[in-house]
């Protein structure tokens, strides 16, 4: 008796578990049994050709019913009424339900951040700070429209804030190798670390630098000491310090400074600061020539250059700009291609 109950429970659990394996077995059993019953019923037209048989089953099970194939014997009609149609409808509905369920689970996993992002050369954001992060994403979308995709990776208990627009990965720790694989750090072109706690920012930045030392690493710190510590271990990392106090002081001494700073940083409106490189194949040229060239041909203003000595704001007009030197300028939009051939020597 106990053995019978065990077998009954096992059979019940197996039959009603609509796994992919069970659906495949049921489909094979349905096809075989339907063919045998129709064969025994004398339905030669339906069973002699495998293509005709499978076509008939699919048309019947999907309730399309073209009518070009149908049983002709009484026994064949009863087989279709009692087995082929009910079994086909149940099996067809189960398969469609399973497919729909898998698609919903796949989409839901992406919204919850449990799926590996399928992208590369992307901008990876580590950290969630509510509206500040959303504002950052919107500015990046404006800057990177049609270029690099954006992926948000966070420890916060949230869902994808912008489904269909950005990739999303949820982790328990920014240093968990297994979970961070989903964010594909190793193929990211830019990694931005911005968390509420500086110690988490530091550990995440160090981990990312170890996994992908070639990526452009940007980290925001409130504590300048931790910012300096990251710079020591990762000289190529770009550490952004908190500038709230500096902006308050400037606004107090020079009214309107805070509004000016916001205009220079807001990429979605007005003049904004951008950067470019002076071509490597060109000869050295003066700041004055480049300044006049940018203003005349591109309505842009050169504000700084970066060489071996670092960034030089408002450089002297006779300062030489060497090949491959970085140039900082202000313009309405990023200038994708400068016509350097028009620069006056």
Image: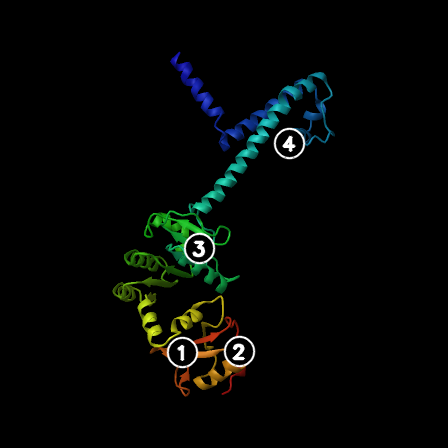
Residue at 52% across / 62% down in the picture?
A: 145
Tell me whether the residue at label 3 lies in contact with that at label 4, contact meaning CB atoms closer than 8 angstroms: no
Q: Secondary structure at mark 2?
A: helix
Q: Which residue is disc 3 drawn over?
A: 151
Q: CA distance from mark 2 to mark 1?
A: 18 Å
Of badges 4 and 2, the one in the foreground is 2
Tell me whether the residue at label 4 lies in contact with that at label 2, contact meaning CB atoms closer than 8 angstroms: no
Residue 273 occupies quadrant: bottom left
- How many residues crowd mark 1 within 10 Å: few (<14), some (14–19), many (20+)? many
Q: CA distance from mark 3 to mark 1?
A: 31 Å
Q: Residue 156: percent from the left, percent from the top?
A: 36, 49
Q: Which residue is disc 2 drawn over?
A: 298
- How many residues crowd mark 2 within 10 Å: few (<14), some (14–19), many (20+)? some
Q: Check the image and report above or below for 59 versus 215.
A: above
Q: Residue 328: percent from the left, percent from the top?
A: 43, 75
Q: Earlier in the sequence, mark 3 or mark 1?
A: 3
Q: Earlier in the sequence, mark 4 or mark 2?
A: 4
Q: Earlier in the sequence, mark 3 or mark 4?
A: 4
Q: Which residue is disc 4 drawn over?
A: 62
């Amino acid at each position: 008796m106990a053995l019978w109950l065990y077998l009954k429970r096992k059979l019940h659990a197996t039959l009603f578990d609509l796994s992919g394996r069970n659906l495949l077995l049921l489909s094979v059993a349905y096809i075989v049994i339907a063919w045998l019953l129709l064969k025994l019923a004398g339905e030669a037209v339906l069973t002699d050709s495998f293509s005709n048989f499978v076509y008939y089953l699919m048309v019947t099970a999907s309730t399309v019913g073209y009518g070009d194939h149908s049983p002709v014997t009484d026994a064949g009609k009863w087989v279709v009424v009692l087995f082929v149609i009910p079994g086909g409808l149940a099996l067809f509905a189960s398969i469609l339900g399973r497919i729909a369920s898998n698609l919903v689970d796949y989409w839901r996993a992406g919204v919850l951040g449990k799926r590996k992002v399928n992208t590369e050369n992307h901008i990876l954001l580590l950290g969630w700070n509510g509206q500040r992060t959303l504002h950052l994403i919107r500015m990046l979308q404006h800057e990177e429209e049609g270029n690099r995709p954006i992926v948000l990776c966070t420890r916060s208990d949230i869902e994808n804030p912008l489904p269909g627009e950005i990739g999303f990965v949820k982790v328990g720790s920014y240093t968990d190798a297994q979970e961070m694989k989903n964010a594909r750090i190793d193929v990211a072109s830019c990694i931005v670390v911005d968390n509420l706690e500086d110690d988490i920012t530091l550990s995440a930045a160090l981990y990312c630098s170890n996994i992908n030392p070639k990526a452009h690493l940007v980290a925001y710190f409130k504590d300048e000491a931790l910012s300096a510590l990251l710079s020591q271990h990762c000289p190529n990392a770009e550490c952004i310090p908190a500038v709230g106090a500096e902006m308050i002081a400037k606004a107090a001494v020079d009214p309107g400074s805070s509004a000016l700073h916001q205009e220079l940083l807001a990429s979605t409106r007005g003049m904004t600061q951008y950067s470019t490189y002076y071509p490597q194949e060109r000869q050295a040229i003066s700041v004055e020539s480049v300044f006049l060239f940018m203003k005349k041909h591109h309505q842009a203003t050169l504000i700084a250059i970066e060489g071996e000595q670092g960034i030089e704001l408002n450089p002297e007009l006779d300062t030489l700009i060497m090949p491959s030197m970085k140039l900082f300028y202000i313009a309405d939009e990023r200038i994708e291609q400068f016509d350097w051939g028009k620069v006056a020597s």
